Amino acid sequence: MDPHRDAALDARTDSATATAWKLMAEFGPRADLSPDVTARLRAAGADEAGIFALEVTLPMLARDMASGPRLNLIRSGFQAVTGQSQSLRNHELLELRRHTDVNSTARMSPVAVSIARCTAADIGV
């Protein structure tokens, strides 16, 4: 294995993941790589390998974000932290989803707890 090649692949994957989250925050969980978005990414310096990685990553994260079990986990975590059953808007669910502890279905990360509390305050809960 070539450690430099692996590092480049890791960096491309991390960049694709970050960009996918940004696109979903901007356009919602059904974000896609329209010609305008692709042109914007290329103008910002994305290469073909980066665009390809994003083409793979974006739908994968969107499917996970929209899955019933994931949304239920986010809602229950929010309710546990805030003590409320207030429904969340899509962008609030997305922001909480970005910070949910993926290693545990029973806990939220400290960042997610903070976001949940701020969201609760913003919506008057």
Image (tube, helix red, strand yellow):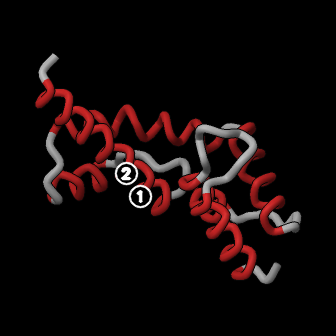
Q: Dot 1 corresponds to which residue?
A: 22
- Check the picture and name the quadrant holding the N terminus: top left
- Picture coordinates of residue 85, whole percent (x, y): 88, 64
Going by the image, does 93 lie left or right of 82?
Answer: left
Going by the image, does 85 lie left or right of 116?
Answer: right
In this orientation, which residue lies closer to the viewer: 61 or 6? 6
**Residues at marks 1 and 2 touching, judged by CB atoms closer than 8 Å:** yes
Residue drawn at 37 percent across, 32 percent down: 56
- Picture coordinates of residue 95, whole percent (x, y): 57, 61
- Check the picture and name the quadrant holding the C terminus: bottom right
- Picture coordinates of residue 114, whole percent (x, y): 63, 69
The picture quadrant where one finds residue 57 is top left
Task: Please tell me how crowded label 2 is: few (under 14), some (14-19), or many (20+) other residues with Cα within 10 Å.
Answer: some
- Picture coordinates of residue 62, whole percent (x, y): 53, 42
Residue placed farthest to the top in the image? 1
* Camera-side mark, 1 or 2: 2
Task: Please tell me how crowded label 1 is: few (under 14), some (14-19), or many (20+) other residues with Cα within 10 Å.
Answer: few
The picture quadrant where one finds residue 91 is bottom right
Going by the image, does 24 lie left or right of 41?
Answer: right
The picture quadrant where one finds residue 36 is bottom left
- Is 113 drawn above or below residue 101 in the view shown? below
Residue drawn at 34 percent across, 36 percent down: 55
Mark 2 belongs to which amino acid?
Ala
Distance from Cα at disc 1 to Cα at disc 2: 6 Å
Q: How many marks?
A: 2
Q: Which mark is residue 9?
A: none
Mark 1 belongs to which amino acid?
Lys
Secondary structure category for the residue under label 2: helix
Q: Which mark is residue 18?
A: 2
Residue drawn at 24 percent across, 40 percent down: 12
Residue drawn at 17 percent across, 59 percent down: 44
Secondary structure category for the residue under label 1: helix
